[in-house]
């Protein structure tokens, strides 16, 4: 059954900072903000199952991109 958990997420970024916030309305036992990689996070609202699926998919891609970037730095 689809359950719209709703809520609000907001983010702002500058040259050397990023602030991410999410409310706790309509959320029980989970956070609307999740870490995908060392310097990558995702904030989401809506259906919790959809958010989890997106985080899993994007988390793998974020990890692949970050490891690829480090490997490129090691090339001669």
Image (tube, rainbow, N blue to C red):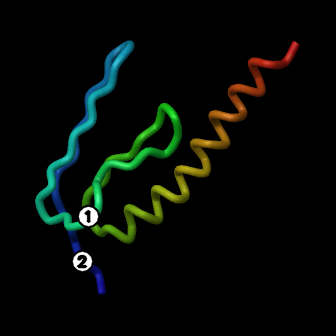
Residue underneath mark 2: 3
**Is 29 above or below relative to 69?**
below
Based on the displayed image, in which of its 4 quarters is residue 76 positioned? Answer: top right
**Is 48 above or below relative to 37?**
below
First-in-chain label (2 vs 1):
2
Q: Which structural element holds mark 1?
A: loop
Q: CA distance from mark 2 to mark 1?
A: 8 Å
Disc 2: CA contacts within 10 A as few (<14), some (14-19) or many (>=20): few
Q: Which structural element holds mark 2?
A: loop
Residue underneath mark 1: 46
Circle 2/circle 1 CB separation < 8 Å: no
Q: Position of residue 44 (x, y in %)?
A: 31, 53
Q: Is residue 38 left or right of residue 31?
A: right
State the residue lying farthest toward the bottom.
1
State the residue lying farthest toward the front.
29
Q: Residue at x 39, y 46 (%)?
A: 42
Q: Is residue 28 left or right of residue 30?
A: left
Q: Residue 36's mark?
A: none
Q: Residue at x 38, y 14 (%)?
A: 16
**Is 1 above or below relative to 12?**
below
Q: Position of residue 74 (x, y in %)?
A: 80, 19
Q: Position of residue 11 (x, y in %)?
A: 26, 34
Disc 1: CA contacts within 10 A as few (<14), some (14-19) or many (>=20): some
Q: Residue at x 25, y 66 (%)?
A: 29
Q: Quadrant of the N terminus?
A: bottom left
Q: Position of residue 15 (x, y in %)?
A: 38, 13
**Is 65 above or below relative to 51?**
above
């Amino acid at each position: 059954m689809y359950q719209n958990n709703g809520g609000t997420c907001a983010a702002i970024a500058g040259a050397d900072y990023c602030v991410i916030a999410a409310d706790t309305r309509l959320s029980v036992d989970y956070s609307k903000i999740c870490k995908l990689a060392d310097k990558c996070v995702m904030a989401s609202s809506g259906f919790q199952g959809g958010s989890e699926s997106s985080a899993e998919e994007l988390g793998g891609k974020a990890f692949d991109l970050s490891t690829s970037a480090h490997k490129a730095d090691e090339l001669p």
